[in-house]
């Protein structure tokens, strides 16, 4: 099983992830990750994380997913997104971004974890 990359730095508007160029928002999963471009699926703070945003994580074999809510807890998650994850039997954690990063890094030591990380509001 490929390991999920560690997040080595988080601050307002900036994240550093092993093996990736620094950026603002990320999708991470076993074996890698990429910048999270909200415009891909029309994601906004409200209504929040879209089902299509998490599909890539499922496609990479995640059994645990960490969804960050932003530094000021402004990022929501659509109920339909939670339904998709529940139907797939995924363990889900939704936390403020710095807490989400810490939890993700811990889980990445032993589980195929994925995450969506928003480094601002």
Image: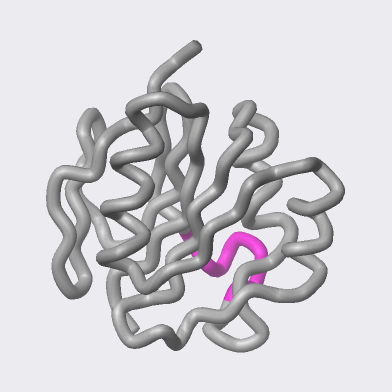
Out of 21 and 118, give the one closest to the viewer.
Answer: 118
Query: x, y (%) of residue 105?
Result: 30, 41
Left or right relative to 100: residue 54: right
Residue under the image location 86 percent in, 49 percent down = 87
Residue under the image location 41 percent in, 25 percent down = 110
Q: Quadrant of the C terminus?
A: bottom left
Out of 34 and 88, give the one closest to the viewer.
Answer: 88
In this view, 118 is above or below 93: below
Left or right relative to 78: residue 72: left
Q: What is the image's colouring?
A: one colour
Q: Quadrant of residue 78?
A: bottom right
Q: Residue furthest top?
A: 1
Query: x, y (%) of residue 3?
Result: 39, 21
Residue under the image location 48 percent in, 28 percent down = 111
Residue interval drawn in magenta: 37-43
In this view, 92 is above or below 48: above
Query: x, y (%) of residue 33?
Result: 41, 37
Q: Quadrant of residue 81?
A: bottom right
Query: x, y (%) of residue 22?
Result: 19, 49
Out of 14 and 82, give the one closest to the viewer.
Answer: 82
In this view, 49 is above or below 63: below
Residue 41 among those drawn in magenta: yes
Residue 110 among those drawn in magenta: no
In this view, 111 is above or below 25: above
């Amino acid at each position: 099983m490929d390991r999920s990359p560690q997040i080595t730095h988080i601050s307002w508007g900036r994240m550093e992830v092993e093996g990736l160029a620094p950026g603002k928002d990320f999708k991470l999963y076993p074996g890698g990750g990429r910048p999270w471009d909200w415009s891909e699926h029309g994601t906004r703070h409200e209504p929040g994380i879209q089902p299509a945003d998490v599909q890539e994580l499922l496609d990479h074999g995640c059994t645990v997913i960490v969804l960050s809510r932003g530094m000021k807890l402004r990022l929501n998650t659509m109920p339909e997104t939670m339904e998709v994850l529940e139907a797939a039997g995924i363990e889900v954690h939704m936390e403020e971004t710095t807490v989400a990063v810490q939890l993700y890094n811990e889980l990445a030591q032993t589980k195929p974890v994925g995450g969506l990380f928003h480094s601002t509001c």
